[in-house]
Amino acid sequence: MLDYITSYLSSNTTPGQAGNVFWATVYILVVFGGISVAVMAMNWLERKALAHFQIRLGPMRVGPHGLLQPIADAIKLMTKEDIIPAEADKFVFWIAPLIILCASFAVYIVIPFGPTHAITDLNIGILFMLGVSSLSVLGIVMAGWASNSHYPLIGALRSSAQMVSYEVAMGMAVVSAVLMTSLHGLGPYGVGVGTSGTGTLSMIGIVQAQQEQHVWFLFKFFPLGFIAFGIFAIAMVAETNRAPFDLPEAESELTAGFHTEYSGLRWSLFMLGEYAAMIAVSSIAVTLWLGGWYRPFPNTLTGETWDLVFSLFPGLTFLGLAAIAFVGVRRMPKHPYFRVQTIGLAGFGAVLGLIGLILFVPPVRNRIQDIFWFVAKVAGFMYLYIWYRATFPRYRFDQLMKVGWKVLLPIGIGVLILTAILGVVL
Amino acid sequence: MAPIGTLHYLVVAAALFILGVIGVLTRRNVVIILMSIELILNAVNLNLVAFSRLWGLHGQVFAIFVITDAAAEAAVGLGILIAFFRNKETVNVDEIDLLKW
Amino acid sequence: MQQAVQPGMQPVATTFFFYLLSGLTLLSGVFVIVRKNPVHSALALIFGLLAQAGLYLMLYAPFVAGVQIILYAGGIMVLFLFVIMLVNLERSQREEQFNKQWLVGLLAAIALGGLFIVVYVKGKNLFPYRIAQPVETNNTQQIGVMLYGQYMFAFEIASLLLLVAIIGAVVMAKKRI
């Protein structure tokens, strides 16, 4: 039994491929916990960042700088009254948020945080992710229908039409990235003589193809990789119903769209599913175009010293966050009412500093590299999401559909054809 | 228990097929009849893929074509349903009898 | 009665998963034909399709499983749900659900079932238990080679078929001006 558990630690595959059920379960629990924490952090960050974009402060009261606000929100939502509309279909009403949750969370099975740090590595990884994330459309349609009222129905129809349209554009961009895994590499902009391997749909295989070809797919066949990444970046914002494509759920338009009639814990399940879907599609974008878990400049700045420099980044990041927390402590008002908050913030800063110091220790430093760079890139995308929400005005629905079908899809097909031609010719 | 062989999958496919046939022959609601047709197509697909394990990948390619055809047929069938629903506000096949004697 | 052992990934608890997945498929098939509310039937069909994708995975056909999830469960069923929402009549759920010749239909289906049983019992030796486990790592590549090589013509005809279906559905469902 102990053998079963420890024999995996020395293997170099994912637990799913090694068939090790125990470690697969451990990974699943870790990923699930990580997503829940990330969703809460994302909630806090969104409110604070939006507020600062709009020259105000955001939640400041609940914890120091509003750090405990998500917890307060969670408690409030859990204790609210559970209202089901009168003529609603109870079973479908109950199951709709569950479908969205399951669809959003099932994507995390194949996301690679490192060369062996995925729950499993399916050979059809990308296909699986596209398919499962398209199942959330079903949940939205059912949520709108089961609410038995006009606004949710219209919101659900609009939202699902939008999601289905942008899935097509996403698929085109993904296919051109997958095509790049089998084309030549080595050389500026990934062009020139190199390995011409077989393409692969598995997520870990795609990142390793980027490594072998010494180029991020973002820069391959410049500007084709860039345009494909741009299409995917726009389509993924539309896919998760986020600004500026959030007409179906905007408050001033449709009184919250398909989740109007949901209150309390059910609504929080929708939000959980939406944030989890955001993190999932950002992870897909990072894996396909941004080199996954590799540190920046993995092929141009090589060597021992550069490895050392980049390996200091995780610790430095946490120490930087601790420094920001301590600056906040110094600027807290010196009034007895704020004593608990000041102590809390100082404690939080101390914990962050401690984590940063632990990350300087060489064994930990070497193991945490992959996960840190992957999470850092995904966190960059999360900040971009919030930035878009603060900056761009909303698209009207017909403009939205026009962009999806008449702009993104032809560009996607063009990029695909050009990638194929360039890959064969060059 | 015997190890799971091809026959197990064929029996499951046959049972699905019979369920689909019962749905097509006994229900009145057109949408449910169309969904039973999808059940029949799925049973056929399961049969094809079960046999492709023995005799090469042709079965899987055929299954992909069947899924494509099922999509086209569902689209056209539902288009017909919507067009008819606009004329006569019913979804029961019993009442779609304008051309009967 | 031996199963060839696959190098690399070992199948885990094959019997349990087969019975679970096929039981789910058949149960959802029963719910499709029995429920009054078409939305419940559509939900049951979605679960059946996902369980069937699991059965395809057990048959070492990952690409077909992926296509099933994307196209069938994520595309066709969305289409069905849209149309159900458009034509949903409350009164049709309170009417009689089974038509007048339900008994004849049931008998015909049972006769078909009898035919299947006879065929499978008599031909049991044609379906060997020993299965040659195909390698699943390059399943997608091999299917791609076949689709673009041997079945190229059928592939192009299928795309033409989809174009015709799109045009037909749009023409039939659009409003008369």
Image: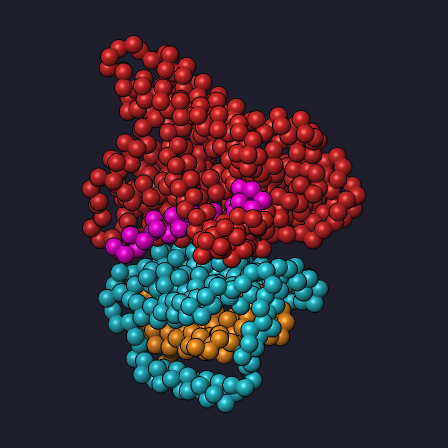
Chain colours: A red, B orange, C cyan
Residue A196, percent across and down?
A: 74, 49
Residue B68, percent across and down?
A: 55, 63
A292 versus A332 height, above or below: below
The quadrant the C terminus of chain A occupies is top right
B89 versus A60 height, above or below: below
Query: Residue at image x 31%, y 83%?
Result: C103
Residue C25 showing in the rendered view: no
Query: Residue at image x 29%, y 66%?
Result: C36
Query: Residue at image x 62%, y 75%?
Result: B55
Dividing the picture into quadrants, the one containing residue C67 is bottom right
Image position of C59 (left or right of A425): left
Span shown in magenta: A89-118
Query: Residue at image x 53%, y 42%?
Result: A113
Q: For the image shown, how many numbered marks are present on the structure?
A: 0
Viewer-proximal residue among C161 and A348: A348
Residue C89, percent across and down?
A: 29, 60
Dividing the picture into quadrants, the one containing residue B29 is bottom left
Image position of A21 (left or right of A261): right
B93 versus C46 height, above or below: below
Q: Judge whether residue A33 is colored magenta.
A: no
The quadrant the N terminus of chain A occupies is bottom left
Residue A111 showing in the rendered view: yes
Furthest toward the top, the residue is A334
Q: Judge whether residue A112 is colored magenta.
A: yes
The main secondary structure of the magenta stretch is helix
Residue A141, percent across and down?
A: 37, 51
Viewer-proximal residue among B79 and C130: C130
